[in-house]
Image (cartoon, helix red, strand yellow):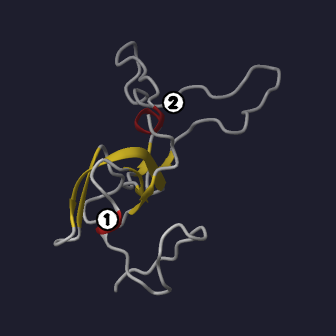
């Protein structure tokens, strides 16, 4: 085993013993699951990419301010930048949960599970799949 994880279970929820390996046969086609993974890291990103800020005009005298965020402060009151202001910084590489995805294929022979929807992270990444916390429709 390359990766080892612990899971908290309620009494009588699933019959498992300590150290037991869980396979995809605990899921069935049509089940709803939550998929948790680490999103792709984008490195240091500016405000246009990170938060979707608008660009500034390409013309009218400026040559290097096109993707700059512009003014961020306030006027005389409160004369400071408020906490939580969206700025440039590291983007991605954080824990992301995609909820309420549908299980489409369960292949116990190959230990393969296919879900409909987006799965966070890069290819060959480690994801955690658990029954959804949302109510079914």
Q: Residue at x 46, y 50 (%)?
A: 132
| Towards the viewer: 125 or 86 | 125
Number of marks in the rendered image: 2
Q: Which residue is mark 1?
A: 125
Label 1 packing within 10 angstroms: few (<14), some (14-19), many (20+): few
Q: What secondary structure is found at the residue carrying circle 2?
A: loop
| Cβ atoms at labels 2 and 1 below 8 Å apart | no
Q: Residue at x 42, y 47 (%)?
A: 98
**Residue 5 visible at all:** yes
Looking at this rendering, what residue extends furthest in the left direction?
109
Name the side, left or right, on which 44 lies relative to 40: right
Where is residue 61 drawn, in percent x and y?
A: 40, 16
Q: What secondary structure is found at the residue carrying circle 1?
A: loop
Give the numbered dot on residue 88: none
Q: Is residue 22 above or below residue 31?
A: below
Where is residue 110 drawn, in percent x and y?
A: 17, 71
Q: Is residue 118 above or below residue 108?
A: above
* For discs 2 and 1, the disc positioned in front in the rendered view: 1
Looking at this rendering, what residue extends furthest in the right direction?
77
Q: Which residue is mark 2?
A: 69
Spatial CA span between label 2 and label 1: 33 Å
């Amino acid at each position: 085993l390359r990766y080892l994880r612990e899971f908290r279970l309620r009494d009588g929820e699933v019959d498992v013993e300590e150290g037991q390996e869980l396979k995809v046969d605990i899921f069935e086609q049509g089940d709803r699951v939550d998929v948790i993974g680490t999103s792709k890291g984008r490195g240091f990103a500016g405000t246009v990419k990170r938060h979707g800020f608008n660009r500034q005009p390409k013309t009218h005298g400026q040559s290097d301010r096109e993707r700059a965020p512009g003014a961020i402060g306030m006027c005389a009151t409160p004369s400071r930048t408020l906490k939580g202001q969206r700025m440039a910084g590291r983007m991605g590489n954080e824990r992301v949960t995609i909820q309420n995805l549908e299980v489409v294929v369960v292949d116990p022979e190959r230990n393969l599970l296919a879900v409909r929807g987006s799965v966070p992270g890069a290819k060959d990444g480690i994801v955690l799949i658990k029954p959804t916390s949302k109510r079914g429709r």
